[in-house]
Image (tube, rainbow, N blue to C red):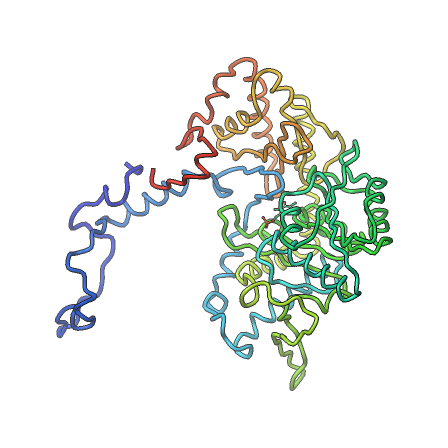
């Protein structure tokens, strides 16, 4: 019954709400609106009682997978549980009701929160200055590249090459292209890490910078990071950290101390803002002090007024700034959630987040490596990459394994990425999963590994019990028919 549209469930005269009675002198709508804009016929609206409406939407809400419904080990995406207290704080009327054009004097509380969040991010990352404007990770990358360009231009240097590893996230080369720079690829060595000698060989007077994810997209910590920083800096380039994997480092090590000049944060990954539906995100960046003049304007400044009272202002007069990269001051609601999350966890809590993310991933890796190939067998950080090669030899593609996982109420891991691993299965359990939840996933993966030989048909036909079966993904992406 809940597969029907509301209009199909409609029953004339049924209602789920009550309105106050009309005033005695009410004559009709034409008393309020010009005749020309009034509709001639009654609108066709569904007529339903409140429980029918609630059940309809609750049923819809669980058709798709989401983190409140089940485990979501989508590698690289950090699909962790988002505490509801973040929502409560972001929805306080003083924040949620703020007008974007409100003058600074009337939004001192919001500006103070943003200023303090910047301080927290600087402390967490070991950077000197922060901008909260970028709306997502990719936007942070793009902003950082503009900073690099502005810095080199100021130094009268024409440097347009950006080096990226062959394991890089797809947004890295995209941002480089969008920023008008050239991509120079550096290969990984047989341990899945940056090959420092090969890096040195591609660094030259055209190198604007090196974009590196640490831990990298194989979930491995770049142990030679200090050497890497020296090589890049020696040739006059800047070192950029794609910080999307920061949940593995919180409180343990800081990008600024490793030698990075700029880093981006993914608020919607590391700091628990709901994501996955394309909703608003946050991709703040942090930079070393020599890059501060180039940050997007406006920046938030603090000065001391009468009686030592702090006054927060948006400062736009910044001659070297790359300019504004987002309307107003970024996605404030997401920043409020990040602030709440950081304050609530505190320094010890943040450290526990990183340690738990790492332990959870290693626990899964060790329990699954007998059933699936593990191309880079070393201690991982918050995620690891298996290969479906063994299963492919038995005639089962990785995509089929991913679809079979859905039958167990679990989201599939990231598959076929990173590109340097054949039949890649990239698993990130995140820090918010209990050992029971991890053990359940291990049992599911082991069952599927057995089914490859014992019952391959059930994998080939998967998903078998989701609201929608196996889609033609190319057509589904091109002809989106949302009213099936
Ligand atoms: C998610 C991710 C990005 C891009 O972040 P968005 O917020 O989705 O734009 C970049 N790099 C890595 C390693 C990521 O995991």
Q: Quadrant of residue 389?
A: top right
Q: Quadrant of residue 374?
A: top right
Name the foreground residue: 58 vs 418: 418
Residue at 76% over, 58% down? 126
| Rendering coords of residue 265 (x, y %) | 65, 54
Q: Quadrant of residue 342?
A: bottom right
Residue 419, above or below 6: above
Residue 4, above or below 111: above
Residue 3, above or below 204: above
Name the foreground residue: 24 vs 399: 399
Count of labels shown?
0
Name the foreground residue: 154 vs 385: 154
Residue at 55% over, 46% down? 81
Q: Residue furthest front?
A: 158
Residue at 80% over, 65% down? 155
| Rendering coords of residue 16 (x, y %) | 24, 53
Question: The N terminus is located in which quarter?
Answer: top left
* Position of residue 71 in the picture relative to residue 46 (left or right): right
| Rendering coords of residue 31 (x, y %) | 16, 73
| Rendering coords of residue 75 (x, y %) | 61, 38
Question: The C terminus is located in which quarter?
Answer: top left
Residue at 69% over, 33% down? 420
Q: Residue furthest bottom?
A: 306
């Amino acid at each position: 019954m809940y597969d029907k549209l509301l209009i199909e469930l409609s029953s004339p005269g049924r209602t789920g709400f009550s309105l106050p009675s009309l005033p005695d002198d009410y004559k009709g709508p034409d008393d309020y609106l010009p005749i020309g804009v009034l509709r001639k016929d009654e609108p066709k609206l569904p007529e339903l009682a409140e429980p029918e409406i609630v059940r309809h939407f609750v049923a819809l809400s669980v058709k798709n997978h989401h983190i409140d419904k089940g485990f979501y080990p989508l590698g690289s995406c950090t699909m962790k549980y988002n505490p509801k207290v973040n929502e409560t704080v972001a929805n306080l009327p003083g924040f949620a009701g703020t007008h974007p054009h409100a003058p600074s004097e009337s939004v001192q509380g919001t500006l103070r929160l943003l200023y303090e969040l910047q301080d927290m991010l600087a402390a967490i990352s070991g950077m000197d200055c922060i901008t909260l404007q970028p709306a997502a990770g990719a936007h942070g990358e793009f902003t950082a590249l503009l900073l690099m360009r502005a810095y080199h231009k100021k130094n009268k240097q024409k440097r347009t090459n950006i080096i990226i590893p062959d394991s890089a996230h797809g947004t890295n080369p995209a941002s480089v292209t969008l920023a008008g720079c050239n991509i120079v690829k550096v290969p990984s060595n047989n341990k899945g890490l940056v090959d420092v000698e090969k890096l040195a060989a591609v660094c030259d007077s055209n190198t604007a910078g090196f974009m590196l994810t640490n831990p990298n997209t194989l979930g491995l910590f770049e142990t030679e990071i200090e050497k890497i920083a020296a090589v890049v800096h020696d040739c006059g380039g800047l070192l950029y950290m794609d910080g999307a994997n920061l949940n593995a480092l919180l409180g343990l090590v800081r990008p600024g101390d490793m030698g990075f000049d700029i880093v981006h944060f993914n608020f919607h990954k590391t700091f628990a803002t709901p994501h996955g539906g394309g909703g608003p995100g946050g991709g703040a960046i942090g930079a070393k002090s020599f890059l501060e003049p180039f940050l997007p304007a406006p920046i938030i400044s603090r000065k001391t007024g009468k009686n030592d009272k702090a006054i927060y202002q948006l400062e736009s007069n910044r001659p070297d700034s790359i300019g504004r990269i987002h309307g107003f001051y970024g996605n404030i609601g997401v920043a409020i959630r990040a602030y709440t999350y950081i304050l609530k966890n505190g320094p010890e809590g943040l450290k526990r987040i990183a340690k738990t993310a790492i332990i959870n991933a290693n626990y899964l890796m060790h329990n699954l490596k007998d059933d699936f190939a593990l191309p880079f067998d070393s201690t991982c950080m918050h995620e690891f990459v298996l290969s479906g090669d063994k299963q492919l030899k038995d005639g089962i593609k990785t995509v089929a394994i991913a679809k079979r996982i859905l039958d167990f109420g679990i989201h599939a891991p990231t598959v076929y990425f990173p590109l340097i691993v054949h039949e890649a299965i990239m698993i990130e359990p995140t820090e918010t999963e209990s050992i029971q939840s991890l053990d359940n996933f291990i049992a599911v993966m082991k069952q599927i590994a057995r089914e490859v030989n014992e019952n391959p048909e059930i994998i080939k036909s998967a998903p078998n019990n989701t609201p929608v079966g196996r889609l033609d993904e190319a057509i589904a992406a091109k002809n989106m028919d949302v009213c099936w």
